[in-house]
Amino acid sequence: MGKILTVKVNKGGIGKTFITLQLGAYLALNNKKVMILTSDSQNNIIDYSKNKEILYKKGLKEFVKGGEGEKIKIRENLFFIPLESNTFGNRFLNSLPLFLEKLKEEYDYVLIDSIPTMKIDSVFVANSDKIIIPCFADKVTIKGVINVVKEAGAEKILAIMVNKYENKKIQKLLLEEIKEAILGTDILFPTPIKNTSDIEELLYKGKTIWESNSIKILEIKRIFEEIGNEILNYDEIKENNLFDIDF
């Protein structure tokens, strides 16, 4: 049975789509079958992973109501279901968990690029095995991160990832605030992702970090490898525990 991971924070523009795509691509490169979903009808995953326009008519809503939507192949083992619009009725929201369960039977991982302040976000979080929180090293965003940890519970948070980091005094202080807030938990807090134009260039070209040979991107790859390996190892540990029974 597959696992669901939601990339979430209560603020837009942090880099959720970028992080979702890189993690999905890493898991796919490790021979895992991965599906990406979104709660944003802009479907930026397509723009970030393709250098050409992709046309579609039906997506997540069509699938959830029992029809046949469209699945877009992003890379080998990596797929994306687009979202038709940002309006969600109760029937859709009530049927969504069943569709997520069906995806878990077909895919090793379902990654969700979730936007804040939407009812669908609550459904995604409730049905997730783990949550990854991206953030900036600024006061408002850090407050939002701490709120998400409190709302979801520390045991459900896999990692907090600081994006577009600049090595400045205030940002260093805010990193310490995060460390203090998660002290005593199992939440991963990897090296921050530095602000670099190399990422912007990759996104413009529709490429992932795994398709770059840039030295600056090498450090960022290591950050995503740390999170990706934790996801892969988490499943291995759980499987081993199932057979670790005393008679």
Image (cartoon, grey):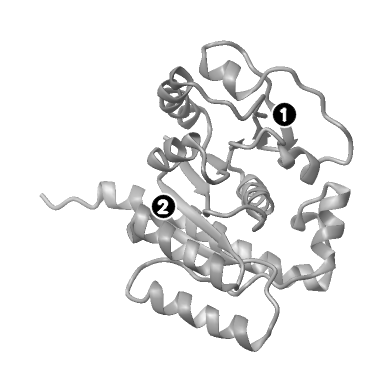
Residue at 55% x, 41% y: name it.
112
Q: Residue furthest left?
A: 247
Indicate whether 109 appears above or below 156.
above
Three-letter amino acid code at disc 2? Glu
Q: Name the quadrant containing residue 147.
A: bottom left
Disc 2 from disc 1: Cα separation: 29 Å
In the displayed structure image, the side of residue 120 where residue 87 appears, left or right:
right
Tag 2's secondary structure? helix
Q: Position of residue 101 (x, y in %)?
A: 42, 28
Visible in this render: residue 2? no
Q: Pick whichever, 110 or 240, lies toward us.
A: 110
Q: Which mark is residue 72?
A: 1
Indicate whether 45 appears above or below 141.
above
Visible in this render: residue 58? yes
Q: Earlier in the sequence, mark 2 or mark 1?
A: 1
Q: Which mark is residue 49?
A: none
Q: Position of residue 57 (x, y in %)?
A: 74, 17
Residues at circles 2 and 1 in contact by the CB criterion of under 8 Å = no
Q: Pick whichever, 156 or 165, lies toward us.
A: 165
Q: Pick whichever, 92 or 71, lies toward us.
A: 92
Residue at 46% x, 32% y: name it.
104
Residue at 61% x, 81% y: name it.
171
Quarter that holds the N terminus: top left
Three-letter amino acid code at disc 1? Ile
Q: Position of residue 151 (x, y in %)?
A: 36, 54
Residue at 33% x, 52% y: name it.
240
Q: Residues within 10 Å of mark 2 (few under 14, many from 20)?
A: few
Q: Position of residue 215 (x, y in %)?
A: 81, 73
Indicate whether 201 appears above or below 31.
below
The residue wearing badge 2 is 236
Indicate whether 3 appears above or below 142.
above
